[in-house]
Amino acid sequence: MPVDSETIGFLEDVKKGKPRHFAMICKGVQILSLIVYKKGTVEKYKKQAKEQGRGQFYHGVIDGKGVDICFKLLSSDGYEKPARQGTHPEKIF
């Protein structure tokens, strides 16, 4: 999996405790492409990630400190829209 120098720099920022966004392409459990960024739209980095490989697209936020880095998934392909109104369990009870 090739990673550009900008992504490596942003991963160093994450190690220092600064959260960053990520876009990732996976096929099964293998990561084909990982892009870490600070600003910009998801669509821009989604296109860039898909140039490096084909598979399932994920994006979210990376945070943590030191070696304890956590990838927090925001959404994946096919789940861009919020849930329909009226499907919340709190409203049922």
Image: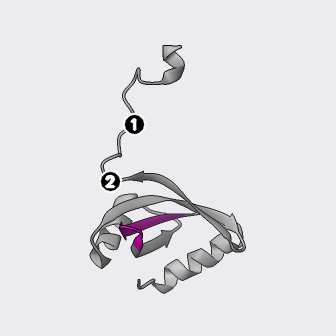
Q: Residue at left 64%, top 70%?
A: 14
Q: Residue at left 35%, top 62%?
A: 57
Residue range highlighted in magenta: 21-30
Looking at the picture, how far across and down is residue 53, in whole percent? 29, 75
Residue 12 sits in quarter: bottom right
Badge 2 or badge 1: first in the primary sequence: 2
Q: Is residue 66 left or right of residue 92?
A: right
Q: Would you place residue 56 above or below residue 80 in this image?
A: below
State whether the magenta stretch is mostly helix, strand or loop. Answer: strand
Question: What is the secondary structure assignment of the residue under circle 2?
Answer: loop
Residue 34 sits in quarter: bottom left
Q: Residue at left 48%, top 65%?
A: 22
Is residue 41 visible to the viewer in this orientation of the structure? no
Q: Would you place residue 6 above or below residue 62 in this image?
A: below
Task: Judge by depth and name the residue closer to the eye, 78 or 38.
Answer: 78
Q: CA distance from mark 2 to mark 1?
A: 13 Å
Residue at mark 2: 77
Residue at mark 1: 82
Q: Residues within 10 Å of mark 2 (few under 14, many from 20)?
A: few
Question: What is the secondary structure assignment of the residue under circle 1?
Answer: loop
